[in-house]
Amino acid sequence: MNTYTSISRRPQQAGSLLLLSAIAVASAIAFTGATLAAAPPGGLTLAPDPTGVIATFNVAGAMDLGNPFFRSLGSNGRSCATCHLPAEAMSFTPAHARQVYNETQGADPLFASVDGADCPGTARADRPGHSLILGNGLIRVGLAIPATTEYSISLVRDPTGCALRLDPRTSLLTASVYRRPLPAANLAFLSAVMFDGRETLAPLTTPSSFTANLRADLAHQAIDATTGHAQAPSPPSDALAQAIVDFELGLFAAQYADAQAGRLDRGGAGGGPVDLASQPYYPGINDSLGADPFGLPFNAAAMSLYQAWETAPPAGDEDQDAARADVAAGEKLFNNLPLSISNVRGLNDNPALGRPTTFIGSCTSCHDTPNMGNHSLPLPLDIGTAHSADPSFEPDPAIRAAVAQLSGPQLPVFLVAGCPNPFNAGQPESFYTSDPGRALITGKCSDFNRLKGPILRGLAGRAPYFHNGAAATLLELVNFYDRRFQLGLTIPQRRQLVAFLNSL
């Protein structure tokens, strides 16, 4: 049965990207209400977000709330839907966490101390002990240090008190890192499962095996989430895991309408989740490093959703015309704006690129999957978001200046020592980080701080941004990139990039 669901929710108190006047706010609210009321059928779940309406599209029709995705399969009351909400682009926001905490005094399963508090064992009523999930929507991820590593790891700052300790259950030295929950939608475009790729057991790099391997990886992830996040005493059956995978692979989340630009699938545009569900994809498509399996060259114009708005005739509404022009201009900047890329692990130390000290790229050098924004082959990177603005911790002035644009939480700081400097062969160097990234999985120096770039669709509905929630708004995110890669953005260009990112 084709249907749609309209979900109202409390407006977020922080993270709005536009400083709207009272009149503009009233107009946006009226637009959002009218859009929700007039939504067409088709398996859409619609909800307001700070700049318009977010939508999750289920290709099977109405959300099947009987699917095990929505059922508690563990011991602490959690389901997959505890952290992956259709109204929030299949993730969740800090505003949601605060509302639920206030209503339940921390009794909701979201705050299970296994990972919903700053440290295990924190009492539900201890609000300061839940500062990271309430402030930045972060889940604690406890990762055992590999038995064999190429580095040593120690703590230099530990605001939570549990950042590096022996796990009482396993007696293994375990690091606590804090990350945003990735959306449980748009999974058919993944090249790695989880920020650090730890659930990518079967590689997602070959077109012929992609579907089977993706299903296997997602099933394994569902089982691990049930025994870990939901604390199930035993794994769910294969049938339950496959039912969750079936449901997830039918979900597509994207911005549906913008309060100023209107419906994002109108006027020749290709926004919204319905068109997204038919977006072509295969592993390596448009690979920026030249590894497209069919030998096709990289096209920097990877984003083409709003090309029609570049030359669209006036629609008769000056404000709407101006807003659509901003979105189209932002997309063009995303494709073409030159970035000076340096000191990025995964790029500047990459032999496929000749290990360049600096090279000129664009946003789509890393976000190359057409109209999705992730990389179409695994390419975990260290762009600097886990670094510090403190000069005693971070030697690169561009990274310090970029991180200073963010409003991230107070996280633990680790010292990783014994690694060579990837940009200065033969020279040892110590590194400071709040999240060693993939190196916590592989034990390799070359993976230090490297994490995948997530799919960008549905950004407006799931602030804050980056793996650690350090960018409260998309303007902060744009300002970070402006300083990090020396973009020299003007104020209008910042507005245009934000408008485009909000339209995804």
Image (tube, grey):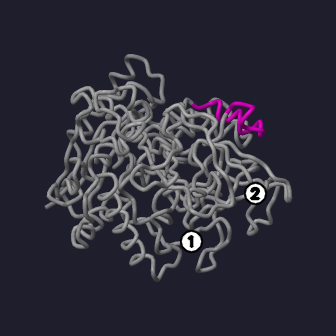
Query: Up-down: is 486 above or below 207?
Result: above
| Front-most of residues 300 and 234 | 234
Tell me what residue is drawn at x 19 percent, y 47 percent.
Answer: 5
Quarter the N terminus occupies: bottom left
The residue depicted at 26 percent of the width and 58 percent of the height is: 58
| Amino acid on which disc 1 is placed | Gly
Q: Nearer the viewer, residue 134 or 322?
A: 134
Residue 214 marker: none
- The answer to whether residue 293 is left or right of residue 94 is right
Which stretch appears magenta? 389-406
The amino acid type of the residue labelled 2 equals Asn
Percent position of residue 384, x then y: 65, 44
Where residue 56 sits in the image (x, y, percent)? Answer: 30, 51
Residue at 26%, 50% in the rendered image: 81
Residues at circles 1 and 2 in contact by the CB criterion of under 8 Å: no
Q: Quadrant of residue 32?
A: top left
Q: Is residue 256 visible?
A: no
Query: Residue placed farthest to the top in the image?
Result: 22
Q: Which residue is mark 2?
A: 348
Q: Residue at x 80, y 66 (%)?
A: 354
Chief secondary structure of the magenta portion: loop
Mark 1 → mark 2, Cα distance in angstroms: 20 Å
Q: Nearer the viewer, residue 16 or 404?
A: 404
Q: Assign a secondary structure to mark 2.
A: loop
Percent from the top left, x then y, of residue 136? Answer: 44, 34
Q: Earlier in the sequence, mark 1 or mark 2?
A: 1
Q: Is residue 399 magenta?
A: yes
For disc 1, the marked residue is 284
Label 1: element kind: loop
